[in-house]
Image (cartoon, rainbow, N blue to C red):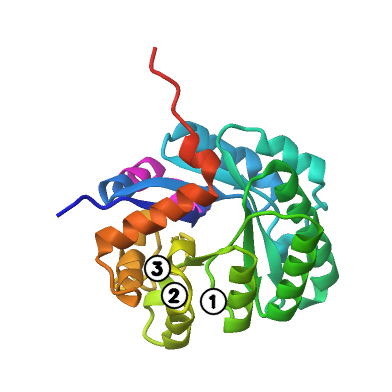
């Protein structure tokens, strides 16, 4: 059986859940075939910790941004700030950003302003935009499309669990959809159908750890090693072997996150 090669395209290794076990968590991921992980910044004041994790662990990269649910409570980030961080050799994405009207609809205007700033940073740096979208499909599709017409950029719809219309809008713009553990939940038939209709060369896999652990770990702390279970569920959707699906999603990641694919660790003195 050929070896499995996976990427966890979205996790939160700076969260307190991993504070005491981070080296072991990274080691378990590698043992499960997860060669690279992208740990995501959700608040700029947390960036030093996020960046330090990527610097300390060769398989870990990071992204920089302000989560939409924090947009109203954090200083509005500037394009300059995002671009400055993006110059770091292991910063490989802009985000996560986006729109969340489920819990924070009252800050919709501020979220939209923040989103457009992140899009401009993605456009200028050439790094992929990492989008969080919840209960905001119409505004999300509209803004992504408006901004793309103003100047091209690349993007992944992280932990995609929205409707078919937003999936179609994102795919029409050349964007990617990322599967989380939700894809393996029993009640996710509609979501599985959306992914089945999408081209497999636009699919990524992720954990969103410590959240959304796939079966058989549902309800427990998620971690990057568990992306193998999400990949197994994804492979079934496309009637592929797990090895072939893992290879495909890794190739997709390398195409989108080209900076991560090109990175080489410094030689040991």
Which residue sits at x=73%, y=49%? Answer: 123
Circle 1 sits on which residue?
A: 161
Label 1, secondary structure: give it: loop
Q: Position of residue 121 (x, y in %)?
A: 75, 47
Q: Which of marks 2 and 3 is in front?
A: 2
Upstream in the sequence, badge 2 or badge 3?
A: 2
Numbered marks: total: 3
Circle 2 sits on which residue?
A: 182
Residues at circles 1 and 3 in contact by the CB criterion of under 8 Å: no
Q: Quadrant of the C terminus?
A: top left
Residue 21: say if magenta.
Answer: yes
Which residue sits at x=47%, y=87%? Answer: 190
Q: Where is residue 71 in the image (x, y as percent from the top left)?
A: 77, 61
The answer to which of 108 and 7 lies nearer the viewer is: 7
Image: magenta residue range:
16-27
Q: Is residue 65 left or right of residue 120?
A: left
Circle 3 sits on which residue?
A: 213
Q: How crowded is mark 1: few (under 14 residues within 10 Å), some or many (20 or more)?
A: many
């Amino acid at each position: 059986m050929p070896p499995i090669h996976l990427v966890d395209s979205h996790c939160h290794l700076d969260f307190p859940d991993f504070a005491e076990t981070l080296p072991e968590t990274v080691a378990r991921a590698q043992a499960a075939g997860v060669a690279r992980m992208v740990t995501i910044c959700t608040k700029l004041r947390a960036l030093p910790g996020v960046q330090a994790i990527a610097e300390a662990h060769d398989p870990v990269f990071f992204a920089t941004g302000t989560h939409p649910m924090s947009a109203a409570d954090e200083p509005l980030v500037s394009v300059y700030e995002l671009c400055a961080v993006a110059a770091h050799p292991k910063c490989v994405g802009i985000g996560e950003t986006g729109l969340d009207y489920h819990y924070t609809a009252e800050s919709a205007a501020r979220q939209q302003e923040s989103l457009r700033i992140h899009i401009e940073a993605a456009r200028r740096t050439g790094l992929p935009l990492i989008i969080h979208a919840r209960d905001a499909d119409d505004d999300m599709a509209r803004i992504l499309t408006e901004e793309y017409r103003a100047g091209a950029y690349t993007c992944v719809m992280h932990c995609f669990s929205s409707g078919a219309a937003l999936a179609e809008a994102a795919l029409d713009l050349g964007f990617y959809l990322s599967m989380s553990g939700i894809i393996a939940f029993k009640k996710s038939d509609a979501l599985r159908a959306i992914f089945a209709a999408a081209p497999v060369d636009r699919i990524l896999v992720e954990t969103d750890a410590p959240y959304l652990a796939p079966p058989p770990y549902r309800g427990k702390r998620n971690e990057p090693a568990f992306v193998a279970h999400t990949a197994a569920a994804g492979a079934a959707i496309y009637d592929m072997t797990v090895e072939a699906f893992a290879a495909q999603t890794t190739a997709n990641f390398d195409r989108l996150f080209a900076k991560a694919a090109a990175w080489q660790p410094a030689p040991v003195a």
